[in-house]
Amino acid sequence: MAGYTELPVFKCEMCGLCCKMSPISLLPHEVVVLEWLANKMNVKLEYAHGYIVYDALSGVNLAFSYVMQLNNGQCPFLEGNKCRVHNIYKPYICRSFPYIPKHVKYHIDDVNKYVMATTEYGLSLACNVVKKHKEILEKYWFRNNESPDKILQHYFKEGYLAAIEGDNIRSLLLTLLSKLWRDGLADIRQANHNAPVVNLYEYLRRFYPDLPNILGIDKITHRVRACLKTY
Ligand code: SF4
Ligand code: SF4
């Protein structure tokens, strides 16, 4: 890419540090995929829900995100420095790391009945490779009229695209929920901490049976079957 002659391209050194740092954020459908995988691989998974809203029509909270907990200080899918789900299904946050969502903000519009999210991304300095490149990255970042998107496309295109894809899926799930709300099939309010919590993806599947196809979950299932033969 023209104008980026001095800027290196990110290359993961496979140190495994990012799999040991903190709980792993997941989109709702990723929990379903990883739970299924964990069962097949005999891996113990623990996760907690993140942001929730209440649907007063069905009487349940809907979880928009989850965090998978570390087990003995590391991701339960990490073996040595290798990710056991690398070739099967790797969560978006792992695919985009060290380009990560630093903050996801949800907006609920009661008047027009829609829910949306805005995500603020950044490069994580917890990764030694980014730390090494910090100075040169900053040099480009703060150049006049420089586009952070263009820098990222040069520096870490794969991670940048994974982040966009993850965000698009988040938006799709929220758009489908907003449509149910406008059609009178849901009534979204602030979280009700006395009600049970349901995975948003599982909830939406009742109304949109084709959702697994749309999200490519059927393809993942085939890949899982093929890969698990090697375990
Ligand atoms: S911390 Fe950085 S170098 Fe290490 S595995 Fe993660 S992305 Fe790769
Ligand atoms: S899923 Fe794989 S890449 Fe992601 S944190 Fe776990 S071991 Fe690391």
Image: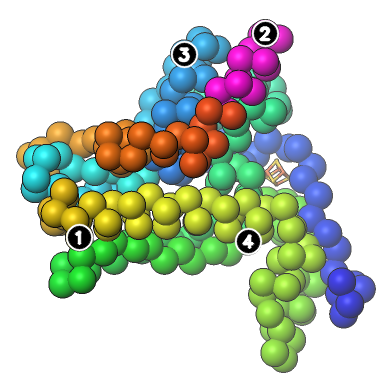
| Percent of width and height locating residue 97 | 63, 49
Three-letter code for the amino acid on which mark 4 is drawn: Leu
Figure check: 174 above or below 105: above
Nearer the observer: mark 4 or 3; the answer is 3
Three-letter code for the amino acid on which mark 3 is drawn: Asn
Q: Nearer the viewer, residue 78 or 55?
A: 55
- Disc number placed over residue 39 in the picture, else none: 3
How many residues crowd around disc 3 within 10 Å: few (fewer than 14), some, or many (20 or more)? few
Figure check: 162 above or below 133: above
In the image, what residue occupies the spot 37% across and 45% down?
Answer: 65
Task: Look at the numbered disc 2 and give the secondary structure of its residue.
Answer: loop
| Percent of width and height locating residue 15 | 73, 37
Q: For the residues marked 4 and 3, what is the alpha-carbon distance in whole angstroms? A: 33 Å
Sequence-first tag of 3 and 2: 3
| Percent of width and height locating residue 166 | 53, 51
Three-letter code for the amino acid on which mark 2 is drawn: Lys
- Disc number placed over residue 123 in the picture, else none: 4
Verify whether residue 20 appears in magenta: no
Sequence-first tag of 4 and 3: 3
The image quarter containing residue 18 is: top right
Which range is magenta? 220-231
Nearer the observer: mark 3 or 1; the answer is 1
Verify whether residue 221 appears in magenta: yes
Q: Is mark 4 within 8 Å of ligand 1?
A: no
Reading the image, the residue beneath label 1 is 182
| Percent of width and height locating residue 139 | 77, 79
Sequence-first tag of 2 and 1: 1
Q: For the residues marked 3 and 1, what is the alpha-carbon distance in whole angstroms? A: 37 Å
Three-letter code for the amino acid on which mark 1 is drawn: Arg
Could you tell me which quadrant the N terminus lies in?
bottom right
How many residues crowd around disc 1 within 10 Å: few (fewer than 14), some, or many (20 or more)? some
Q: Is mark 2 within 8 Å of ligand 2?
A: no
